[in-house]
Amino acid sequence: MANFDPAAATQAYLSILTPDQHAKAVAYTQGGHWLLLWSAVVSIISGILVLRSGILPRLRNWVEASRAKPIRAILLIVMVDALIESVIALPWDIYAHWWREKSYGLTSQAFGGWMGEWALTNVLSLLVTPLLILGLYVLIRRAKSTWWLWGSLMSAAVLVVVMVISPVVIEPLFNKYTPAPPGPVRDAVAEMARANGVPSDKIFIYDGSKQSNRYTANVSGLFGSARVAMSDVMFKKDADLAEVRGVVGHEMGHYAHHHVLWFSAAYVLIALVGFFAVDRLFPQVLKWTGAKGVEGISDPAGFPVFGIILTCLALASTPIRVTMIRLGESDADRFSLERVNEPDGLSKALAKTIEYRAASPGRLEEALFYDHPAVSRRIRTAMNWKAAHGANLPPEVARP
Ligand SMILES: [Zn+2]
């Protein structure tokens, strides 16, 4: 392809959006970086409010006086704390996750629908999280100085269970998942699945347009439940086959290279560091918050201190977390180009994600905040691939 210019081709894709649309995407994306900070602040403030109110120690005294089993006492205290903190944070959540999305035109979901899902998420979390936290307190009381080590192993086990059951039990509560309907799209996807060793009954379409207008697909589940799911938004915005192939090739990359498994392992390491930090910093942070009536790390009335320390660490480690995910995304793009060879299809689909992820951040902004590589660079990579390999050749010719 002697007269193909990758830089000009990249520019042509970026020009699909008007300068106004790019400016809006930049405002949305950079505002999103600030949301990370403000969300952490809201969560820390709600923890401090609960600690200073003394409500949890009063509750603890009350359940102890009623001679309830220690396990029930811990569960009750932790659930009350989770409930209070999520209610305190609710106005912020409404702003950050619904109102703001709505004002940028990124969701068409009505407030009632969003609120219903918020309630469902919180009920699920109230059922699962206190059990995990109960486990932590049992470990703190039994294993004392090494609880953080056992605690991260236990979190790993819980994480694996949640990921395995998520596509079967949790995700269907929020969306309807159906096998891709018959037609050229399903045929193309099934053909790719066969060529890449992904079982074709593992590819689903879900009604993602209910929550968000984002052009997106994902891989979820673990081991036998792992699958590729495409939002129906992909089929509404004049999907063409090259585009579907490019995107599904990317998702198959996540699937084939077991990214979910790798990220899970990384999260276990993060939990290990986090719990160790909680173990060391607990007394000092407890003092700073001005908490009343908390009797040390083994007292569940001090649980908001865990939240405060872990929130600070999560915020500080954002660049590590996003960089890890970003490397996985580059790997999935590479998989798509090598196996499916649809650089233009992939680029056309990527251009549609610019509206919620500004295309051309500086290198530092990308490193600190972007969990996907910048679209301008992803498209350039695809166009460089096209320049080097040609595109849209039959797979048996394109594949070495
Ligand atoms: Zn991806």
Image: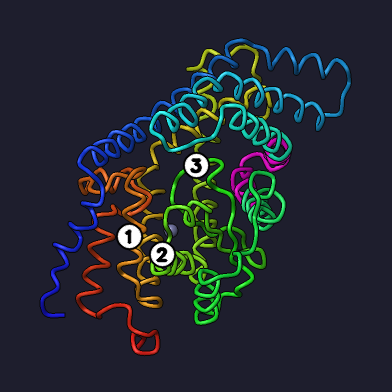
Q: Considering only vertical position in the picture, is 399 above or below 176?
A: below
**Residue pictured at 20% horizontal, 46% vertical:** 362
Q: Are marks 1 and 2 in contact (CB under 8 Å)?
A: yes
Amino acid beneath label 2: Asp
Q: Secondary structure at mark 2?
A: loop
Q: Nearer the viewer, residue 96 or 18?
A: 18
**Residue pictured at 64% horizontal, 71% vertical:** 201
Q: Mark 2 — residue?
A: 240
Q: Answer with left or right where residue 19 lies relative to residue 103.
A: left
Q: Which residues are magenta?
A: 129-154
Kindly give the residue lying farthest to the right in the view shown.
Answer: 67
Q: Secondary structure at mark 3?
A: loop
Amino acid beneath label 3: Ser
Q: Secondary structure at mark 1?
A: helix
The picture quadrant for ligand 1 comes to bottom left
C-alpha gap between disc 1 and disc 3: 19 Å
N-terminal label among 1 and 2: 2
Q: Are marks 1 and 3 in contact (CB under 8 Å)?
A: no
* Mark 3 crowdedness (10 Å alpha carbons): few <14, some 14-19, many ≥20: some
Residue 348 placement (x, y as % from top left):
32, 60
Q: Which mark is residue 212?
A: 3
Q: Mark 1 — residue?
A: 348
Residue 356 placement (x, y as % from top left):
36, 43
Q: Considering only vertical position in the picture, is 128 above or below 265?
A: above
**Residue pictured at 71% horizontal, 27% vertical:** 79
N-terminal label among 1 and 3: 3
Q: Is residue 136 magenta?
A: yes
Kindly give the residue lying farthest to the left in the view shown.
Answer: 3
